[in-house]
Image (spheres, rainbow, N blue to C red):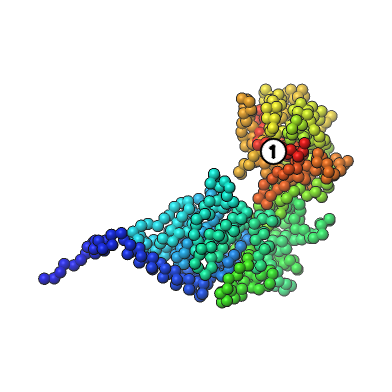
Amino acid sequence: MPRPRLTAANRNSIVKNRDPAGLAGRRLFAEQTQAQKQKAIARFWYGDGYLYFQEWVKQNYRTHSGLPLRWDEPFFAGFISAMANPWLLRVTVVKGAQMGFTEILIALVAFCLVELRSSTIYCVEEKLKLMDIVGPRAQPTIDSIEAAQMLRMMALKMRGRKDTDTKQRNIDVGGVPVYFAFAGKAGKSGQGRQVSSSLSSVPVEAYAIADEVESFPPGALNILLERTSASTLPTCPLRCGSTPGAEGGVVDVEVKTSRYFFDWFVTCPHCGSGQFLSPKGNLFRPVSVEGKSEMQYFDATGNPLDWFYRDGSTLASKIETSYLGCSKCYEELSRSTIEGGAYRCQHSGEMLADFTDRVQKTRKPIVEGVALRLPRLASNLFKLQERLARLAQARNISDRADCLQQGFGEVSSFGAGRIDKSLLLECIGRPLPEGCGKPDLIVVGADQGLGHQITVVTYWYWGEGKTEREKWERARVEVKWFGFAYRMEGVESVAREWQADFVGIDMNPEAYSAGQLAKKFRPDRETESCKPIEAVRSSSVERSPDYFDKAGIAFLFYQTALKGEEVRNSTRKVQGEEYPAFALDRTFGMDSVLELVHSGRLHLPKDWVYDPRDKESFLYQMLTPERTAKAQWVEGNEPDHAFHALNFASVTAMCWFDLPRPTSFVFAGVGNKQSSAYY
């Protein structure tokens, strides 16, 4: 009699009875994972190297949209050869925005998980960035890779549990994790720590990846490298990159301290000269500037002095007819010439292809730093005229620096550091241009001290522009008086004496007195056009009917950090009384002062003399605030009241014209700390 055939359910039941905990399946899966890992290590480190990664990406990788990775950029193959070479321990990439860098980092992560079967870490600058990377980018990418999904199904069948897949920190593929972390501190857990606790207790076997390192706190990269110290692989490379910041920033330092720096090298077909493709030289032309020993590409405010163009009759025609040219003979470089370039080391002259092949053959780790630039000018997506137009339309130093850093991938020092002393001294005795008659506006700015209000009186002459904002941005500002005013009554007296239109003052430390000053001159009805004071100026500024009996409308400010805003409607309650207010972004206000000086639109009395020993002088206090590479103004122990007083005057002039008329004239934004060294 034939035996009954066992069904699949019966087999599973027998297997389960023999191994109720499922340990046999887990052990078998672990053994298969280890075998695959050893096989991949042999091929990646001791065989094909980056070619292995390149082949895998072309055959298996899919982006978060489910499409294959684009390979149409001329520099992409060289870029991949450096990023995926396991013997290069530290590679830093300098790039512009949207050049495919993050996509390659995610591809490296997928390669480590699926092929190398080794854990990795992906670190970003802040916690909120994790949501932008993990959910919208990394998860859909892993879900779109067939090999990753096959591993997940096999792991579920043999291990009896699903892989971890969260939207915040971890993604597993077949039990192998990628850890997502952020470098900045967050919450109470960051107290007393150099970087975020998310970098703790993370064992990394393969690549350590750092995205947008320009925004990392000091020491974060070194701590990230410590996470790889227990790796059993032949090497555990670090790959980091970012759009650059100012000179002295993280990316700038990494590049300058790297032994190898590979940049895109082209040869001019007209004169035969070889050159590294760069916005400085191949787009922007150098100009000799009086007082400067070196040729300059930009003025002190970040405006390009000259570039390659065919028609220079107007600014629009200069942009429309712009082109990329040879830095030697100035002839145009064709698209085929640029695409025919290759990566070459700026220090040794060695080509990147020869370098990576040599390193792969010798199988010796390169412990010195390697830097590489993604050439924005060589990209197929680079739109020359559009980029120049954005740079020409940039409103201030910060915007121009962003255009160069994000749009061209260039390190920019515009606005970083302190106000240029030579440019400030050039403001002394600078005559007003012809046509500047009587001032359009008289504004008093005051920064509160301990008992005294450091006060400045400014005359404003609007520049040419289609909008009131443009007129303010191009205005000439003449400082007529600077000194101390005793309490709020002194500020009022100064405003009356100079017949000021407006007064801009911060709220701290005497918030109540400042509020009362603003409340005292609060108009009770709608403003209307009144006859201007012809003896002082001819102006079309609207004033309340009882304006001539008052010192001028008062604006209250407190400075804070606003994201994506310059000013914001707000209210401030002081001793039970609530005042309508506007918050003022600290960086925006202080940048407006920097722009005044560096653009040559500030005019100071001709009898002023700079004395580095006189800490109470206007000139000394204008040179004390410092702007960091991250576009933040920091306070030191030196007095800076004059800078803030001019800041409040500048933003007051902008607010009245740029913002909707408030029902009251009280403006506010966050008080700055007073320097005890001043008194």
Where's residue 589, x and y in %? Answer: 70, 41
Does the image show residue 338? Answer: no
Q: Write the residue at 53% across / 46% down.
A: 189
Pick whichever, 438 or 222, lies toward us. Answer: 222
Q: Write the residue at 76% across / 24% down.
A: 550
Where's residue 423, x and y in %? Answer: 80, 49
Is residue 382 left or right of 429 when viewed as pictured? left
- Work out whether 151 lies above or below 659: below
User: Quarter holding the N terminus?
Assistant: bottom left
Q: Write the residue at 56% across / 77% down.
A: 361
Where's residue 571, x and y in %? Answer: 61, 31
Pick whichever, 187 or 645, lies toward us. Answer: 187
Does the image show residue 307? Answer: yes
Is residue 364 left or right of 553 when viewed as pictured? left
- Which residue is label 1 attached to? 673
Is residue 673 left or right of 57 when viewed as pictured? right
Is residue 600 left or right of 320 when viewed as pictured? right
Residue that lies at the very extreme toward the right in this rendered image = 607
